[in-house]
Image (cartoon, rainbow, N blue to C red):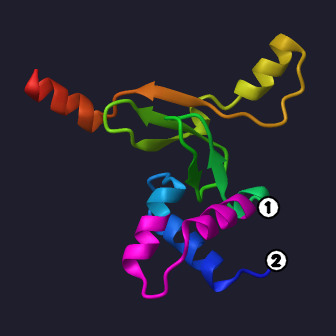
Amino acid sequence: MNFSKQRKRILETLKNNAVHPSAEYLHKKIFDENDDKIGIATVYRNLNKLSEIGTIKRINGLDGSVHYDHNTHVHYHFFCKKCRKIFDIPSDISPNIVKKAEELTGFKIDTHEIVFHGECNNCRIKGEENG
């Protein structure tokens, strides 16, 4: 697939902002950092296309908005309820989870997403300091 100049810029911005950004966040970053402006509809369209072809990962349901991840390898996510940041968690914390789930249920699992919710270390420490 040929990548347009705009698609390359969107993908590059996503890779350079590994905070699992939303389309709005990426649009603002691109808009603030570049002379030639890209519209929000173009950002959405390209993110959707990049996720459809598997170049990036679309993350749904963390805080009511869609986020994007340039890391397409199997991994889990942690969503901090205080600062609303998203962090990666390596999948090797439970290497056989899919196999075990299939054995216990008889299901055939094609894909899975696991999201942990709580407070990140920074927010937890700030809470203890202010507590």
- Residue 41 is a magenta residue: yes
Horizontal side of 120 relative to 111 (left or right) equals: left
Horizontal side of 24 relative to 74 (left or right) equals: left
Q: Marks 1 and 2, how far apart in space?
A: 9 Å
Quadrant position of the N terminus in the picture = bottom right
Q: Position of residue 123 (x, y in %)?
A: 25, 34
Secondary element at tag 2: loop
Q: In percent of the image, x 61 and y 65: which residue is there?
A: 41
Q: Position of residue 114 (x, y in %)?
A: 62, 31
What secondary structure do most residues of the magenta stretch adopt?
A: helix
User: Do the numbered discs 1 and 2 sit on residues whose CB atoms are within 8 Å?
Assistant: yes
Q: Position of residue 30 (x, y in %)?
A: 46, 73
The number of callouts visible is: 2
> Around disc 2, counting alpha carbons within 10 Å, would you say few (fewer than 14), some (14 to 19), or many (20 or more)?
few
Horizontal side of 30 relative to 115 (left or right) equals: left
Q: In percent of the image, x 15 and y 24: which residue is there?
A: 128
Residue 109, above or below 50? above
Q: Nearer the viewer, residue 54 or 36?
A: 36
Quarter-of-image position of residue 61: top right
Can you identify the residue that label 1 sits on? Answer: 53
The magenta segment: 27-49
The tag on residue 1 is 2
Secondary element at tag 1: loop
Q: In percent of the image, x 53 and y 35: which residue is there?
A: 64
What type is the residue that disc 2 sits on?
A: Met
Q: Nearer the viewer, residue 60 or 31?
A: 31
Quadrant position of the C terminus in the picture = top left
> Around disc 1, counting alpha carbons within 10 Å, would you say few (fewer than 14), some (14 to 19), or many (20 or more)?
few
Among numbered discs 1 and 2, the one appearing first in the sequence: 2
Residue 19, above or below 47? above
Q: Position of residue 23 (x, y in %)?
A: 54, 57
